[in-house]
Image (spheres, coloured by chain):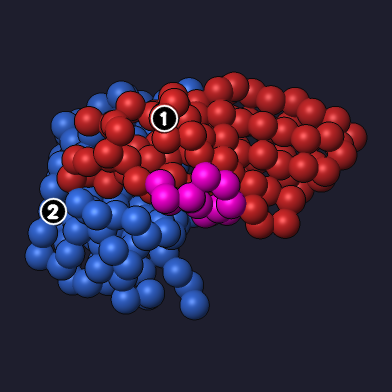
Chain colours: A blue, B red
Amino acid sequence: NAGVTQTPKFQVLKTGQSMTLQCAQDMNHNSMYWYRQDPGMGLRLIYYSASEGTTDKGEVPNGYNVSRLNKREFSLRLESAAPSQTSVYFCASSHRGPPSNTGELFFGEGSRLTVL
Amino acid sequence: GENVEQHPSTLSVQEGDSAVIKCTYSDSASNYFPWYKQELGKGPQLIIDIRSNVGEKKDQRIAVTLNKTAKHFSLHITETQPEDSAVYFCAAIGGGADGLTFGKGTHLIIQP
């Protein structure tokens, strides 16, 4: 099983450009998440989808949009990239999700984004 | 919402010694406390978790303890090995709707 697959693994953007990070999971999980990881800041939740058809803001949603395309896929879009969005982005999935998220999160390998 | 503090940010120990990483949380309603290990270039992976109705849980060389009164929990790794070198994150789930809140991470370095 592939688990959680993210694309692309690396991307360089110029300020103001747009892009979409793709994520797919093959574990039939209900919930999916997008986190960003910055040095000294840990993992911060951007958006999540507790179940197919729903999305909700996390701790740092500004500048991002998401789409839960189907049960398998959850994409993250940067409409107008800014240098502050330079980060490593992780997609994750879990069988159960908020508000009673007591299940294991399975993470992808990350997407490293640099905005110049 | 929930706030999770994690210490230390960097921990260096000799191979074979024990390592302890500590976390505190703010929401007394939190009931689930996982620990994730992140190796270089990889995504985090769950290594152990504990629920609020349990005080301690062990899995081979790793253990987690929980003190609900003091609102803190700790990860203990005994007989450390080179493959234990990684970044470790604690997390807690509070009473809000956002799910897991992570600590800022501890970079564990195992010195040969």
Instruction: Name the residue: 18% across, 71% down.
Output: A70
Within 10 Å of disc 1 (Cα), the crowding (few <14, some 14-19, many 20+) is few
Q: Is residue A107 left or right of residue B98?
A: right
Q: How many marks?
A: 2
Q: Is residue B86 left or right of residue B67?
A: right
Q: Quadrant of residue A32?
A: bottom left
Residue placed at 77% from the left, 42% from the top? B78
The foreground one among B80 and A6 is: B80
- A30 versus B27 height, above or below: below
What amino acid is labelled 2 in the image? Answer: Thr
Please, is residue A54 above or below residue B30 in the view? below
User: In the shown orientation, is residue B52 left or right of residue B22?
Assistant: left
Please identify, in this view, whether the residue under mark 1 or under mark 2 is nearer the observer: 1
**Range of residues picked out in magenta:** B45-57
Q: Residue at x 45, y 69 (%)?
A: A3
The answer to whether marks 1 and 2 mark residues whose Cβ atoms lie closer than 8 Å is no
Would you say residue B60 is visible in this rendering? Answer: yes
For the stretch drawn in magenta, what is the main secondary structure?
strand
Q: Secondary structure at mark 1?
A: loop
Depth check: give the residue in front, A102 or B15.
Answer: A102
Please state which amino acid type lies under the numbered disc 1: Thr
* x and y percentages locating residue A52 in the rendered image: 15, 67
Asked if one can make out residue B38 in the rendered structure from this viewpoint, the answer is: no
Q: Is residue B48 magenta?
A: yes
**Which residue is the site of mark 1?**
B69
Farthest left residue in view: A53
Marked residue chain, label 2: A
Q: Is residue B24 above or below residue B29?
A: above
The residue tagged 2 is A55
CA separation, marks 1 and 2?
34 Å
